[in-house]
Image: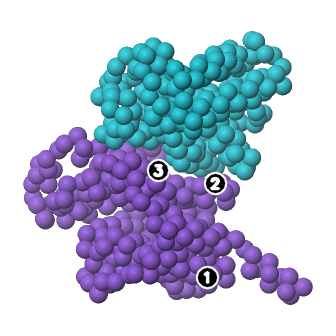
Amino acid sequence: MQIGKGKQFLITLAAFLILGISFKVMVLVEGLTEVRPVNAIPPVAGLICGPVGAAACGIGNLLADMAGTFSASSAIGVIGNFLAAYLPYRLWSLFSDEEPNLHSGRNIAKYCMISAICAMTVSWILTFGLYILQGVWMEQIYVYVFFNNVGFSVGLGMPLFIILTSDSIRIKCCRFTEKNYILEQPVLRQAVCVGYAGFMLLLFAGVAIWRFSPAEAPWLLSVSAAAAACLIVMLV
Amino acid sequence: MTKTENNILLISITLCWASSYIFIKNLPQDFSSYAYLTLTCGIAALLMALIFGKQLRKLRKSTWIKGGILSVILSVNLLTEKKGISLLAPSNASFLAALTIIIVPLFMLFFKQKPSKNFMLGACIIVLGLCISTGFTISGFYSTGSFYMLASCIGSAVYTIAVDRYVKEEEPLLICIVQMIFSTIIGFFFWYMENPKTFTGIVYTRELLSNIFILAFFAKAYAYIVLMFSQKYTDAVSVTVIAATEPVITLGLSVLLPASYGGGQGVSSSSVVGAVVIAIGAVAAGLHFPKKCEKKSKG
């Protein structure tokens, strides 16, 4: 089944709005985050619709924020949700030549790993974005966003992706086939990805496990800068 | 669809149903069971019709009939379950609900389908796990609540077996939409009999609408579509085994969710041991090791 780009955008946006607004009542941090099953959508939208799905997630998050939690930090939310969908799309094609599917144990493991990296990325962007732009440090935001993303991406996103790629629906996934402008060799790109995953794990340990803030541990900002460089190299 | 994919789908349904209690609990105390059935099934049917509108052209008379039968069984199941939960202690209600794992294979005997040895072993371990998780302290079974809960349990078993047969003959998606439409009609009929004001008799708040919408989306639309799809590729017994792992998922939710949403509760050692035993039972029921043992012993 092949769906047009416009329809892909509208379906993703509608799903994001419906789920995003419904759960605004389950607030975790007032004005910032809530229990978000809507986080199941970005990895699925990214793997199926590519950049179109990612754009729908970013805009959908902004519109959903207007139903209760709209603030200056919503701009960071747009970037976070865009990346939550765009990163799986790029990472999958970096580590696999086949169209995204979960028909094998290896692909299921790949999906879970990508979901975990994306969850760490979104939590990093939101927490450090708030710190850099507004001077607010809230480690619980990192933890809530991480568990919201990884839990719902795997718990709900994975079954949703299985249905959409099943024999009955057989939706055609979007694959990244263009050239990477900075790192042409796949081996180098994979090495940068591994480095990025390492930086993300370090940040996760620093914030979620050791409970450091950038004021106490300035190395968190250095690692963030290195991670940001890796992210740009991977995406451009 | 591979077996692993199918199992992931079934686990996600169990996750949806296990977490739905949070939202049911958030509904007002005096909220009618019939209103609940009408609104959740109605919204689910509407959503499905909107998303899969084009598929509705393929509807056949047989799909309407089978969908209608399923909706009657489902309505009986949901209404008796809600009544049973309201009259029983939660541990008794969940224990009785989990007995479906024994009732399904018993009913399957009517269709001359004998459960496998590994399933029998798995079912016994799961029941043991349920007993452990309740601390062997179940009492107060002689009540009307137990009658409702057992009726719901039988309804659930009949429903699982009926779905198993029907989705192999009809398009799963269509039968699911028809089932939701009829369930809405049944719910609305009883709701009207109970309170003719129906929709106008409800005080709509943002919380109520959110909870209803979440239940309609996850516990109805998503869960039933996925159930129909996965039952096309598996049998009723496998569905029952995975559904029996609900206490394991509930335990996980109670640890992960914040206290204000029904989580953050202390986890007793008996519930942890019970959950582990249930998980072992589910794995045992899903494996085929007794057959291999038989072959080896024959060889």
Q: Earlier in the sequence, mark 3 or mark 2?
A: 2
Q: Which sits in the foreground, B9 or B97?
A: B97
Which residue carries the number 1 mark? B120
**What residue appears at the point 31 percent right and 81 percent down from the top-left corner?**
B146
Number of marks drawn:
3
Subunit ID for the residue under disc 3: B
Shade representing chain B: purple
Subunit ID for the residue under disc 1: B
| A83 in relation to B19, above or below | above
Q: Quadrant of residue A169?
A: top right
Q: Secondary structure at mark 3?
A: helix
**Residues at marks 2 and 1, CA–CA distance in whole angstroms:** 24 Å
Q: Can residue A177 be seen?
A: yes
**What residue appears at the point 56 percent right and 55 percent down from the top-left corner?**
B9
Which residue carries the number 2 mark? B5
| B227 in relation to A235, above or below | below
Q: What is the three-letter code of the residue carrying label 2?
A: Glu
Location of residue A144 in the rendering, given as x and y in whole percent from the top left corner: 46, 37
Shade representing chain A: cyan
Mark number, residue B256: 3
Which numbered disc, 3 or 2, marks the residue closer to the eye?
3
**Residues at marks 1 and 3, CA–CA distance in whole angstroms:** 32 Å
Q: Earlier in the sequence, mark 2 or mark 1?
A: 2
Q: Secondary structure at mark 2?
A: helix
**What residue appears at the point 61 percent right and 57 percent down from the top-left corner?**
B6
